[in-house]
Structures are given as structure tokens and as C-alpha cells.
Image (cartoon, grey):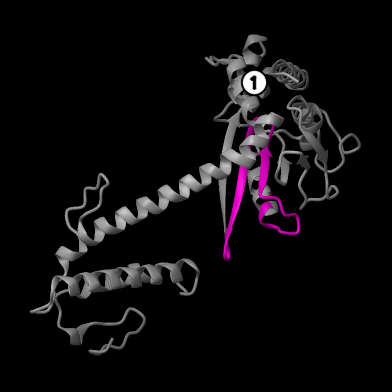
Amino acid sequence: MTTDEIRSDLENFVDDLYRRLNSRELQEVLDGDIRRELTGDDLGLDDSEFTGYPPERWLERHLIEYVLDDLGLDWEPQPYGRDDDRPDFEVRGVGVALMGENKSMNKIDEAISDMEAYLVNKAIGPDYGIATDGIEWHLIRIEIGGDFADYQTIRELDFRPVLQAIAAERGYVDFDVDVDVDGEIESFWDVFAEEHLTSLLTETAPRELRDTRRRGIEDFFDLYIELLFGQGKGDYEYKTNLMEDIVAPRGASESEKRVFAITLVNRLFFIKFLEDKGVFDENDFLLKRVEAYHEYEGKSPGTFTNPRSSRCSTNC
């Protein structure tokens, strides 16, 4: 399998589209701003030819399946049966569980949304998924942490400039696009071809994830130190820090001020965590406290009103 075969299949796909659409329709489908969605009527299809979702099934048959074969992937269609809540294909022999979901052209957001639902469904169980509308190809990973799921796009490739260039070369549409078609296809090959994909999923992606986590922890700790003590190493522009703003009781030591600052920030973090997890009814618990503080700033303690109550007392 070679990149030449992928180029040939993309050219054949554009030719097929042009036979089914007029120039204006083809231009709108390939235009990155308009992104016209195709119907079965646009393509001259009916349910007897492609049961269920004609544009999506037509795209499978006329592009996606060819590309998967060109990449040398061992794949199986509808591994769990053809159903609305099941992936469209499974890729084997790449070292991890990998599923794929495709939608009709210009519906990449739907493909990504469905793939994320499959990834979080442990009855299906993959850690990685491919979401594509034939134009864009997204390689997605799920990270489960406690009761939340985080999705990362490991790689993202876009054939739109390539398809535009091919259509313009053939005189089908008037796209002024400057793109290295072979170079773009080579970049796609370097990610999704079987030998590259296996290495990416089993070695490169896990290493990148570890490095990203490490950088995230280091950056967070650096910002934490900067906001508390003004001693972070990053390129920050904060004019003050919590230690400078603390009005401590007379006789309080520097160590006591530090303990107070750290305790306060840690408790705020905990409240924010509870807020994010929906423990509080509102998702702006802390913000309302800040607003209440500014509203009553400078007044005597006896005039402070709890934002949750209309009653007022010195214990609010």
C-alpha cells in the first residue's frame, strides 16, 4: 500500500461527487466556511441502495473503506452489529482497542460526539477512537479519572485542502488553494498507516500524555507559588500576591502568615472542586461570595447579609 493509492482514491471520490452534484453544490460541500451537508437526494440515493443513512453509508463505500484498506489496516465493519449506538468499524492489530465512527461529509462534530460516547461506554471498552466524516480524521483518546472522563485529540488531519485542490485541478470548481497534495497525504499516512499507528498508540501517545501531565503539574505548582508568595518562575504579570495582601493580627509571625495563606487557598480549591462536581446547586458559589464581599465591603459586621438568606446578623 502506498500514498499514491490514497491520492487515486481521493481523485476518484471527487470525480464521483462531481458526477452527482453540480459545480455550485460541489463548491459548497468542499468550502470550509459553507460546509454543505449532503442528503440522499443530493447523491441520487434511496433507502433500497443504502439502508438507514444513505449519505453516510455511501461515504463508507466510496471513500472511507478504500482509505482504510490503503493504510494497510486490519479492520472490520460494524463489530457490534449495525445500530445507532454502536461504532461503525474496529481496527485490529495496532496494540490497543481502537474503534471508528464515520458520518456523512461535513458532520465531523457528530462523529466526534458519538465516538466520545463509545469511548466512555465500558461495555464497548476502547481507549482510542477514530472519528471521521471522510474530510477530517480525528484520533481521540479517553482518560477516566474517578467519576469524570477527559478526551484528548491525539492527532487531527484534514483532507479539505487536498480535495479542493483536486477539484480545482480538474476544473470542477474555482478554488484558489495553495497546498502540497502529496505532502498532505504523506502526513496522513505518517499517522494512520498501520506501522505508524501502532507505534503512535502504544509508545508515542502514552509518552506525550505523561509529558503533558508532568508539565501541567509543574505549571500549576509554579502558578500556585506565584499567587501565594510572588515567587513563581513563570512570566507572570500579577502586581500582588496573597502574602502581601494579608492583614495579619499584631505579633503574627511570617510562618503563621504563610500557614494561613496556604490553608485559605487549599480550602478555596476544595470548594471549587465541590462546585465543579455539582455538590452546590449553583455553579458560581465562590463568585457570589466575592460579589457579596465587595457589596458590603467597608460596612460594619452587623450589616452583612448572607447571599443565601435575607436575614442579617453578626453570624451571617
- Please identify the quarter of the rendering in which residue 64 is found: top right
Q: Is residue 90 left or right of residue 113?
A: right
Indicate the position of residue 38 as horizontal and vertical percent values: 71, 33
Specify few, some or many for label 1: CA neighbours under 10 Å numbering under 14, 14-19, or 20 or more. Answer: many
Q: Residue at x 24, y 47 (%)?
A: 236
Q: Say which of 247 and 33 sits in front.
A: 247
Q: Residue at x 78, y 50 (%)?
A: 86
Q: Say which of 198 and 164 sits in front.
A: 198
Indicate the position of residue 70 as horizontal and vertical percent values: 76, 24
The quarter of the image holding the C terminus is bottom left
Residue 120 appears anywhere in the view: yes
The quarter of the image holding the N terminus is top right
Indicate the position of residue 239 as horizontal and vertical percent values: 17, 53
| Residue 108 painted magenta | no
Q: Residue at x 59, y 26 (%)?
A: 31
In the displayed structure, 247 sits above or below 311; it is above
Q: Residue at x 30, y 88 (%)?
A: 311
- Per the image, the residue denoted by label 1 is 163
Element at badge 1? helix
Q: Say which of 308 and 24 sits in front.
A: 308
Q: Is residue 28 left or right of residue 216?
A: right
Q: Say which of 6 and 252 sits in front.
A: 252
Q: Is residue 230 left or right of residue 202?
A: left
In the displayed structure, 154 sits above or below 282; it is above
Q: Is residue 201 left or right of residue 209?
A: right
In the displayed structure, 238 sits above or below 203; it is below
| Amino acid type shown at disc 1 | Leu
Residue 36 appears anywhere in the view: no
Indicate the position of residue 201 as horizontal and vertical percent values: 63, 40
**Range of residues picked out in magenta:** 119-148
In the displayed structure, 232 sits above or below 309; it is above
